[in-house]
Image (tube, grey):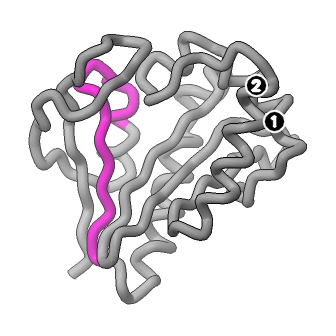
Amino acid sequence: MLRKPRLSDAPMIFKTYACDPKVTKYVTFKPHKSLKETKSFVKRTIAEYKLKRFTFAVESRETGELMGNFAFRIDRFKAEIGYVLAAKYWGKGYATEAARAVICQLFKNSGIFRVWAVCDTGNKASARVLIKAGMRLEGKLKRWMIHPNRSKSPRDCFCYAITRN
């Protein structure tokens, strides 16, 4: 289930994934060192709704546990997606389920014609999620994004997308 994040989510976000070096390996932030850092992150994601940057908490329907987050950024007729899940939820189809649901909802918005995502060329699991969500590999973007837990320099990323006719 996707829902708007709440400041009260910060302790669980910190505990389940934000401080985990394994989870943050391919994201654009370093592992959080404190709950204060995670609270700042949550406050920022809530404030970004005004900028058409939407981050949702991913929550288990069965247990209510916070599993990760899923974000999309709208830019006129296109939207970029991204996600992170706690390691204990990897390989169970949750990221694919969330990606498919978000893509479907974005295409119901008559103004969105393209949904895209990038992932580090070393992140094979994320590439599989995007393919299973119906996206196609469009190419490799050379030195596209800095993943600070991998390198201080920009790294190559694969670009995946799906379009609406």
Tag of residue 60: none
Q: Residue placed at 73% from the left, 31% from the top? A: 38
Element class at badge 2: helix
Q: Which residue is mark 1?
A: 10
Q: Residue at x 45, y 28 (%)?
A: 27
Mark 1 is surrounded, within 10 Å at the Cα level, by few (under 14), some (14 to 19) or many (20 or more) other residues, namely many
Say if mark 1 contacts mark 2, CB within 8 Å: yes
Quick one: 39 or 61, which is closer to the camera?
A: 39
Query: Spatial distance from mark 1 to mark 2, Cα to Cα?
Result: 6 Å
Question: On the image, which quarter does residue 106 sit in?
Answer: bottom left
Q: Secondary structure at mark 1?
A: helix
Residue 96's place in the image compared with 46, above or below, is above
**Left or right: where 34 falls relative to 92:** right
Range of magenta residues: 113-128
Looking at the rendered structure, which numbered label has been put on residue 14? 2
Residue 100 image point, x, y percent: 46, 58
Amino acid type at image mark 2: Phe
Membership of 123 in magenta stretch:
yes
Quarter-of-image position of residue 131 = top left
User: What is the x, y in percent for residue 33?
Assistant: 70, 13
Q: Using residue 85 as the reference point, say whether residue 127 is left or right of it.
A: left
Vertically, is 3 above or below 67?
A: below
- For residue 131, side relative to residue 103 (left or right): left
Which residue is rendered at x = 82% and y = 51% of the image? 6
